Image (cartoon, grey):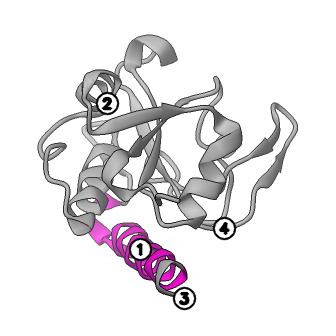
């Protein structure tokens, strides 16, 4: 029972962090001088901070992408595994850099506990909470990205055993 309780506790903390970021009024997209301003990076480091991880603070999505790709704190996973990780309470981000998106800035969103979604692009897609041009908490990663993103899990949050 101890290990199951640990998973439930980690998942509850993750869900609360995700909901807090989604509900944060400052993270709603806004038009400033005719430009859409989004806050995906701020939501990501708020969630990470609530989990107890502060090394993403102040980074933009491009910096986060570079950092996660090289930091021993993060482990890359294929998309097929990440819904299960999130369901066990692991902090998992989907991310692409501006270069990979061919846009002016990168994008990051959080894989949330839930059920995989059907995707016309990829067959299935992990459930995510997205803060960006459109904020949502009920869709799949296919709704947040056109190209398939990379996925990184915070090693310290991955269930062992």
Q: Residues within 10 Å of mark 4 (few under 14, many from 20)?
A: some
Q: Are marks 1 and 4 in contact (CB under 8 Å)?
A: no
- Residue wearing tag 3: 1
Q: Are marks 1 and 3 in contact (CB under 8 Å)?
A: no
Identify the magenta region: 4-27
Asked if residue 102 is positioned above or below residue 48 in the image, the reply reads above
Q: Is residue 28 magenta?
A: no
- Residue wearing tag 1: 10
Q: Quadrant of the N terminus?
A: bottom right
Residue 114's tag is 4
Chain-order first, disc 1 or disc 4:
1
Give residue 7's position: percent from left, percent from top. 49, 75
Q: Relative to the observer, which residue lies in front, 116 or 102?
A: 116
Q: Residues within 10 Å of mark 2 (few under 14, many from 20)?
A: many
Determine the secondary structure under disc 1.
Answer: helix
Give residue 17's position: percent from left, percent from top. 35, 71
- Residue wearing tag 2: 68
Nearer the observer: mark 1 or 4; the answer is 1
Give residue 154's position: percent from left, percent from top. 35, 47
Q: Relative to the observer, which residue lies in front, 74 or 60?
A: 74
Q: Are marks 2 and 1 in contact (CB under 8 Å)?
A: no
93 sits to left or right of 74: right
Residue 38's tag is none
Q: Residues within 10 Å of mark 3 (few under 14, many from 20)?
A: few
């Amino acid at each position: 029972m101890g290990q199951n309780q640990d998973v439930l506790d980690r998942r509850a903390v993750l869900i609360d962090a995700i909901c807090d970021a989604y509900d944060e009024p400052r993270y709603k997209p806004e038009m400033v001088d005719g430009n859409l301003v989004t806050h995906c990076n701020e939501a990501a480091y708020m969630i990470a901070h609530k989990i107890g991880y502060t090394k993403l603070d102040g980074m933009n999505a491009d910096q986060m992408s570079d950092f996660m790709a090289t930091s021993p704190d993060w482990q890359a996973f294929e998309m097929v595994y990440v819904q299960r990780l999130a369901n066990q309470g692991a902090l998992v981000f989907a991310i692409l850099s501006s270069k990979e998106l061919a846009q002016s800035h990168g994008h990051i969103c959080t894989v949330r506990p839930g059920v995989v979604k059907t995707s016309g692009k990829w067959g299935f897609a992990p459930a995510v909470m997205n803060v960006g041009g459109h904020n949502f908490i009920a869709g799949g990663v296919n709704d947040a990205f056109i190209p398939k993103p990379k996925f990184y899990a915070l090693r310290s949050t991955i269930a062992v055993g």
